[in-house]
Image (cartoon, rainbow, N blue to C red):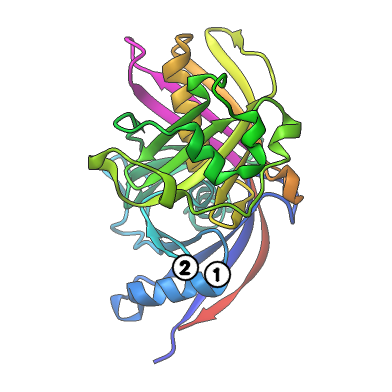
Amino acid sequence: MTISLPFTTLDVFTTTRYEGNPLAVVHIPTDPKKQPSSDQLDQIAKEFNLSETIFVYLRDESTDNGADELPEWKVRIYTIEGEIPFAGHPTIGAAVHCLTTLHPSASTSGKPLKGRLLAPAGPIDISFDPASGAASANIPHNVHIHTEKPPSLNDIHQLQPSLKDHFNPSTPSDAINLVSTVKGMTFFQVEVPDVETLGQVSTLAVRPDAVARMDAAWNVGLVGSYFYTITSPFKAAEDVEQIQVQSRMLLNSFEDPATGSAACGLAARLALTRGGNRVVDVELVQGVEMGRKSVIGVRVELNQEKNAVERMELRGSAVRVMEGTVEV
């Protein structure tokens, strides 16, 4: 039996079509007999050939509400290599899509709307503000900075031979880190001195997972390379530290226009290690070099002792591009 599944594509972390990071949102029907298998979801994601595809399981309006009466949607996220527990740009794209098209009050309310995505990494509270056109998501997090075998200069030389002259024994030790936002989503975080150096990063690099030496209990999942430079001084306004960053994310020979999970990991590490305010706002610009500028917002709130992340919020916009059906 052929199953037809409606889909929508959106460009995420932008308000301009054909910029940002493309995402496919595929609806899965409520009838279990018409739901594709995991293998079929994997095939669909490979067919779209985007950095991620998110599958949204349509809700039974009579039962699929949380205890607080927020509408909930189960979601599964796939790359072309398989399922992952969490990713930022599918979360924001799905938040915009679900709250503007699937929410019971989507067509009648001009007020901010709220809901919840039930992802493998955990429940994600989402909201959408029609006035700003932006969505926010309370991100599940389990931030871990790998320390058993810290990344070295040689690791960066392997990942990016073009940057060898910029990374030498005088390079600050905190310029290279290996950080997991959640278990299974890990990124090298490499700080470069300026935007010009960031532009020298090449996609012709070795696989990050061939270089990474993750802590034993965390040695699982995806590993990417996240290169960044801080483009503004650290500023504090009303007890909120503000940081602006430009970044690039590479996974093997692939470059991603916007990577919310990597942005969250970087924002968390900066908040934890700077010794500044409890609340840190980071605005990250990514995808400039590939002509798909994306703007990602992350707010990190630390606990009173400033030694753990208490709350992490991801913010961004999305614009609809295409609609259709995919058959399995």
Residue at screen point 31% across, 56% down? 64
Judged left or right of residue 1, residue 234 is: right
Which residue is outermost to the bottom?
Answer: 1
Residue type, label 2:
His
Who is closer to the viewer here, 186 or 56? 186
Judged left or right of residue 16, residue 299 is: left
In this rendering, does residue 210 appear at all?
yes
Q: Earlier in the sequence, mark 1 or mark 2?
A: 1
Residue 90 x, y percent position in the rendering: 51, 52
Magenta residue span = 296-316
Q: Which residue is mark 2?
A: 27
Residue 17 x, y percent position in the rendering: 74, 54
Residue type, label 1:
Phe
Q: Secondary structure at mark 1?
A: strand
Q: In this rendering, is residue 104 above or below 323?
A: above
Q: Which residue is mark 1?
A: 7
Residue at screen point 67% across, 49% down? 20
